[in-house]
Each structure stands twice: as structure tokens, then as C-alpha cells.
Amino acid sequence: MDKKCGNLVISLDFELFWGVFDVVTLDSFKRDMDGAREGIPKLLELFEKYGIHATWGAVGFLFAEDEDKLKGYIPEVLPKYKVKKSHYDYIESGSITDENSIYHFAPDLIEKILETPNQELASHTFSHYHGNDEGRCGESFEADIVAAKRIAKDKFGIVPHSLIFPRNQYDETSVRILKEQGFIAYRGRPESSAYNGRALVRRMLRLIDTYIPVCGKKYYDRSGCLRDGIADIKASIFLRKYSRRLRLLEPLKMKSIKSQMKKAARKGKIFHIWWHPHNMGGNLTMFLRQTEEILMYYKELHEKYGFESRSMGELAKEIMEENA
Ligand SMILES: [Zn+2]
């Protein structure tokens, strides 16, 4: 078998307020969401300029134009969370108004994603399903996924094939349900145990790992991706926003990313970067500048080593064909 070229995968968790409604107030998060709204079209321009095939995992609620339209898609079986607040209780609380509608719905941005060549519109579940809550269950997760597919098909004629689990929380049952629902790829957690869980020590390790690689290599081989007919396109790194406070460490962050990308390109491995569009809020200019630096380096590796940008879905298809 000839040597495979390496792949850069970029995925985005697009959620606006649905990803954080249970942990922050809307007012305190507006700046971040404005950053997402302003940044997405600029990011799409960069992706087109550098030939990036990105995967956009969008929360299904965002596909609706307004609360009334959304209500037509709410599944019959709803999750009964024990710890977390439910997205459906939030809707019922009457918190959505005409003024804050742009932080809950975004068909305009989804349209822009679809207008840009080589972008994959994937799912981030319908409601931003809380996969670790004690009250989660297979039945309500399945109903959520069916609703996500339904709204994507109705509004944009798209059937999503890849999924990004909210907060990277999932178990074997949710992966099995995805496969049954026709999905071919999901984004699994990075291999290092530091990336599994929210304990303080693990979060600290992850922060340090951004600047000084302490959690080992981040790239991986495609041979281990396929599991029971669905591909786990694992995350390599979360792209942290530019930090003014830690600005002296910023060059280390970029150096670490590039070094991993180069190794992946030379060895024919996969390197997968992810972030949320709202991470661009606060300092959009610096975020876009660092993103472009990464994409320029990708171009260099593409020319030198044949490093190729692939969406999660494209990569999953290739891997399945190789294993057929
Ligand atoms: Zn999310």
C-alpha cells in the first residue's frame, strides 16, 4: 500500500447561546456571540482562500428562524435532566425576545457556511444535548438526533453525516445511536486522559499543554479511527483564544501547533484542530491573525508533503473505502 498523505481536520462547534445558557447570562456572553457572528463570514473567507474543508457542527435550534418555527421541531420525547437545566425549560421561560433572537437563531450564518465551497454542515445535536447528565437516556438522545436531521433537511436540504458531541460528552450508547441514524463520523476526545473530564487538575494540565506539550503527541494514524462502522475523528487540540495576559506565551502556543502539524504532515497522520466561533469574541483580529498563520503553514506543508485538508465526513468516507 502506498504511503498516505497526512490530513489537517478543522471542526467548529457552532452553538451561540445554546451551548452555555445554563452557565452564564446572555448579557455577559453577548461580546463572545457578537464575535462569532462577525467572525464566521471572515473565517469562511480564510477557509476559501487556503482551500480548507472545515466541518461545522451546528446546534439544530440555530437552523430555525424564530421560536415559533423552532417549536414545530421539538421532539415528543424530551430529556429529563437531573443536574443540568433543560434547553426546553429555557424556551418555556420566555427568555427569547425579538431583540435577543440573533443569539438563539442563525439560519443566515448557516446559509453562508453552505455557500462557501468545501464546507461540511454537521450536527452538534438538536438541542446541545447534555450527554453526561444523570437524566440522559438513549430514547431522548435518539429523538434529539432525529429532530436535528429533520430540521437540517427541511430548512437546507442537508442530511448531516458527522456529529460533534456537546462538551465532548458521550458514551457507547450514543455512538451506537448515531451509527443507526446514518452518521459516519464523530469527534472523539483526545487520547490523553488529561482531556477526559472537567476536574481542576485536568483543566490545568490542558492549559499548560497549550503552550508546552506535556500530554504527548496530538496527531494520530487513520488506521485506528474506524470502530464498528463509524469513524472516530479524534480531536487533537482546542485552539485557545489569544490571551493578552499570557501574551508572552502566545508564540509558544503557535510553535507547538506548527510542530505537531509538521510531524503529522511528514508521517502521514491526522491533526485535528477545533474551537467554537464564540471563542473569537473579545479579540477577533488576533484570533483571525493566528488562524491565518496556521492556514499559511498548512499551505506550506501541503506543497512540501502533500498534507491535505479534509472535513470529518470526507475523511470518514476515505477511511471506510480503504477498509471495505
Ligand atoms: Zn457545544
Image: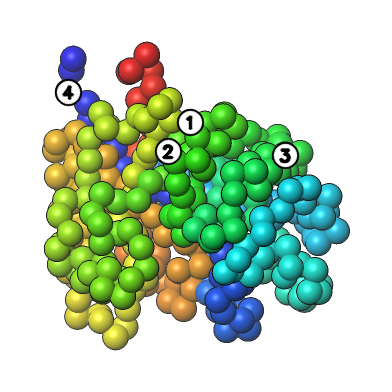
Q: What residue is at 52 percent from the left and 55 percent from the top?
A: 131
Label 3 amino acid?
Arg
Q: Is residue 205 left or right of residue 151?
A: left
Q: Secondary structure at mark 1?
A: loop
Q: Is residue 81 above or below residue 46?
A: below
Q: Are marks 1 and 4 in contact (CB under 8 Å)?
A: no
Whether ligand 1 has any atom under 8 Å from the Cβ at mark 4 is answered as: no
Q: Which residue is mark 3?
A: 150
Q: CA distance from mark 4 to mark 3?
A: 40 Å
Quarter of image, res 62: bottom right
- Please identify, in this view, whether the residue under mark 1 or under mark 4 is nearer the observer: 1
- Please identify, in this view, whether the residue under mark 4 or under mark 3 is nearer the observer: 3
Q: Secondary structure at mark 2?
A: helix
4 or 2: tag closer to the N-terminus: 4
- Please identify, in this view, whether the residue under mark 1 or under mark 2 is nearer the observer: 1
Q: CA distance from mark 1 to mark 3?
A: 17 Å
Residue 112 lies, in percent from the top left, at 62, 50
Q: Are marks 4 and 3 in contact (CB under 8 Å)?
A: no
Q: What residue is at 19 percent from the left and 76 percent from the top?
A: 249
- Category of crowding for the residue at label 2, using alpha-carbon neighbours closer than 10 angstroms: few (below 14), some (14–19), many (at least 20): many
Q: Which residue is mark 1?
A: 184
Residue 289 lies, in percent from the top left, at 35, 66
Q: Quadrant of the C terminus?
A: top left
Label 2 amino acid?
Met
Q: Which residue is mark 4?
A: 3
Badge number at residue 312: 2
